[in-house]
């Protein structure tokens, strides 16, 4: 059986990492049996020093995009089989937007905004005793803020970052329009990826941020996230 190594659930979201949710959502959509193993200690074993990674038939595959590629090659691409090449190109562009741009907006909201440091301490470092947890959060936040600056997003003001993130949310909302899933009645890979990100912004109550309020203001994105959640993650 496929083993999925991830961080673990927070609130009613199966993982705090959109990349881990993406893989788990894909496995559920594709009806592939798997075992989820949760814990930050798996980072030490992760081939690329990041989660998620999977183990299947003695093979270890790291990185959510390579994992999905491997699953499609090994078990067949049932979800996207009906998509035209043009649809696949659109899906690819949206997936890159979510993975490479919206991810940093999410990191900024959780790690840079001061008021979320209590939630970080409680949710991500709850096992570490006081006052060590305070020091760990302080050092981790400093490191993440450096990464935000190096990536580029951290050079903008908080307000500009919300504006950048809102453009992505609007693009998703406009493309989804009144459809149940991004390409119609049936979910595809893009739905797994979009759910992975939107569920962090819309259903994870422990963190608050202006960009999460923006996400919640798009009625169809909220309905999509709830629909996906009820259909694939309620059991
Ligand atoms: N490109 C990777 C990104 C995975 C990633 O960034 N994971 C983060 C959590 S969201 C991580 O493991 N961070 C731990 C670290 O950087 O130490 C993928 O698609 O799987």
Image: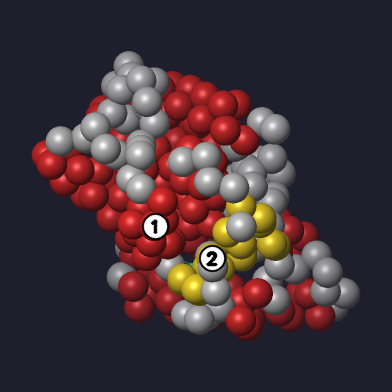
Q: Which percent across, then down, holds residue 201?
A: 52, 43
Quarter holding the C terminus? Answer: top right
Q: Nearer the viewer, residue 40 or 151?
A: 40
Query: Is residue 103 at least partly visible in the picture?
Result: no
Choose top left, top right, bottom left or bottom right for residue 20. bottom right
In the image shown, does 228 or 197 lie closer to the viewer? Answer: 228
Residue drawn at x 48%, y 57% is 19
Q: Position of residue 149 (x, y in %)?
A: 38, 74
Dot label at residue 124? none
- In the rendered view, tell whether residue 229 sits above or below residue 6: above
Compared across the picture, whether 225 is left or right of 137 comes to: left
Horizontal side of 124 relative to 46 (left or right) equals: right
Q: Which residue lies furthest to the right in this view?
A: 129
Q: Contact (CB < 8 A) between labels 1 and 2?
A: yes
Residue pictured at 75% horizontal, 68% vertical: 125
Q: Residue at x 36, y 52 (%)?
A: 72
Location of residue 76 in the rendering, given as x and y in whole percent from the top left corner: 36, 48
Tell me the CA gap for discs 1 and 2: 10 Å
Q: Can residue 107 be seen in this view?
A: yes
The image position of residue 124, as x and y in percent, is 70, 64
Q: Is residue 153 above or below residue 142?
A: above
Mark 1 surroundings within 10 Å by alpha-carbon count, few (fewer than 14), some (14 through 19), many (20 or more): few
- Circle 2 sits in a helix, a strand or a loop, which is it? strand
Mark identifier at residue 74:
1
Task: Give the camera-side residue of 3 and 205.
Answer: 3
Q: Element at badge 1?
A: helix
Q: Residue 56 carries which label?
A: 2
Question: Going 70% across and 62% down the picture, which residue do you hit?
Answer: 38
């Amino acid at each position: 059986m496929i083993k999925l190594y991830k961080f673990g659930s927070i609130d009613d979201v199966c993982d705090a990492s959109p990349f881990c949710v993406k893989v788990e959502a894909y496995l559920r959509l594709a009806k592939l049996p798997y075992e989820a193993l949760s814990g930050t200690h798996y980072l030490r074993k992760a081939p690329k020093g990041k989660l998620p990674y999977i183990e299947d038939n003695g093979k270890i595959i790291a990185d959510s995009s390579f994992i999905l590629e491997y699953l499609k090659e090994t078990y067949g691409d049932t979800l996207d089989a009906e998509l035209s090449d043009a649809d696949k190109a659109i899906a690819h562009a949206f997936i890159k937007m979510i993975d490479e741009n919206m991810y940093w907006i999410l990191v900024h909201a959780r790690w840079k905004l001061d008021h979320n440091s209590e939630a970080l301490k409680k949710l991500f470092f709850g096992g570490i005793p006081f006052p060590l947890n305070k020091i760990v959060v302080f050092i981790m936040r400093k490191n993440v803020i450096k990464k935000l600056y190096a990536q580029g997003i951290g050079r903008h003001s908080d307000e500009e970052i919300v504006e950048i993130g809102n453009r992505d949310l609007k693009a998703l909302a406009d493309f989804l329009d009144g459809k149940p899933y991004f390409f119609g009645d049936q979910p595809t890979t893009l739905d797994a990826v979009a759910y992975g990100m939107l569920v962090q912004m819309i259903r994870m109550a422990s963190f608050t941020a202006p960009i999460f309020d923006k996400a919640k203001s798009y009625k169809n994105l909220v309905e999509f996230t709830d629909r996906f959640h009820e259909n694939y993650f309620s059991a």
